[in-house]
């Protein structure tokens, strides 16, 4: 069964989509794992596909419609015979968007996320899921199926403040904080808050610090190529490759999810 990694942030512009997509590519290429990248950021659908130069024709809505016809996912036609995911050119990586167009977001049934993940789980080693930044029903339903939650933070006052609020909210929702880990992006920012201040402000572990790589990242995004493939030697890419290795080698970082009635 796949391990489910949910990635979110509390504000836009912190690099969440970039980190999520490149982590998935790194796991597939560098670690030779079967990975499904799921884009459940329903507020900004399509950003991840454009970043990776992908043109999906089906989405979770198609899979939900199919599962509604096959109420027992274990009895449904195997995924390989009813292809919902987009087979990418990145070895081992498949892609599944939540919706294809913004106007479809209101039709997304968050109650089906458990069935979606359950159906995909037997075909992959990892499900890497971008859930956006809004505490929506979809967001909470995805968290409820996670084995690991990665929270992308930048070293600035607003991001730290919003992250503390988000952690309080997660506790209220009975999501265990030891399931949540922080990825600190732009860790080398000149105007940043010190690492010690961040650690003292946030009661969860920082598992990775990623530096700014504006030129390399910008070129990769404009080309529609993951930066871990376009510029694998820059520190940003090396950090994500190392994170992928950690996910494979350290099974203790994952927790068995326990559903909570929200």
Image (cartoon, grey):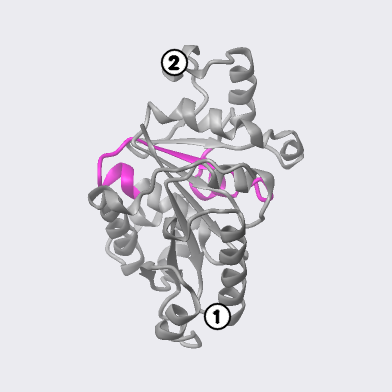
Question: Which segment did they paint magenta?
Answer: 26-54
> Magenta stretch containing residue 46, yes or no?
yes
Position of the N terminus by quadrant = top left
Residue 31 relative to residue 59: left or right:
left
The residue indicated by pointer 2 is: 78
User: Where residue 173 sits in the image (x, y, percent)?
Assistant: 61, 54
Secondary structure of the residue carrying numbered label 1: loop
User: Mark 1 packing: few (<14 Cα in 10 Å), some, or many (20+)?
Assistant: some
The residue indicated by pointer 1 is: 156
Q: Residue, x 25% and y 40% (percent of image)?
A: 32
Disc 2 to disc 1, how far (Cα)? Answer: 46 Å
Q: Residue, x 32% and y 42% (percent of image)?
A: 28
Residue 194 relative to residue 57: left or right:
left
N-terminal of the pair, mark 2 or mark 1, is 2
Q: Quadrant of residue 240?
A: bottom left
User: Where residue 260 sits in the image (x, y, percent)?
Assistant: 57, 43
> Magenta stretch containing residue 146, yes or no?
no
Position of the C terminus by quadrant = top right
- Foreground of the two, 198 or 172: 172
């Amino acid at each position: 069964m796949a391990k489910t990694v949910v990635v979110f942030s509390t504000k836009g512009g912190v690099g969440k989509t970039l980190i999520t997509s490149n982590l998935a590519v790194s796991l597939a290429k560098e670690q030779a794992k079967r990975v499904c990248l799921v884009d459940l950021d329903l507020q900004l659908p399509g950003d991840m596909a454009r970043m990776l130069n992908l043109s999906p024709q089906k989405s979770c809505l198609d899979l939900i419609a199919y599962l509604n016809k096959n109420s027992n996912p274990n009895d449904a036609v195997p995924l390989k015979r009813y292809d919902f995911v987009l087979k990418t050119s990145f070895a081992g990586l498949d892609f599944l968007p939540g919706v294809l167009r913004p106007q479809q977001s209101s039709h997304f049934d968050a109650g089906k996320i458990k069935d979606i993940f359950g159906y995909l789980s037997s075909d992959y080693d990892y499900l890497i899921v971008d859930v956006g930044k809004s505490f929506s029903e979809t967001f909470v339903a995805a968290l409820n199926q996670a084995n690991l939650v990665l929270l992308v933070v930048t070293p600035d006052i607003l991001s730290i403040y919003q992250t503390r609020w988000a952690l309080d909210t997660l506790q209220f929702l009975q999501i265990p904080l030891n399931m949540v880990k922080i990825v600190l992006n732009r860790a080398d920012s000149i105007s940043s808050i010190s690492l010690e201040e961040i650690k003292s402000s946030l009661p969860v572990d920082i598992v990775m610090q990623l530096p700014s790589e504006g030129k390399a990242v910008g070129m990769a995004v404009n080309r529609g190529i993951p930066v871990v493939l376009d510029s694998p030697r820059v520190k940003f890419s090396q950090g994500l490759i190392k994170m992928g290795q950690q996910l494979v080698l350290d099974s203790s970082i994952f927790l068995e999810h326990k559903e909570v009635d929200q």
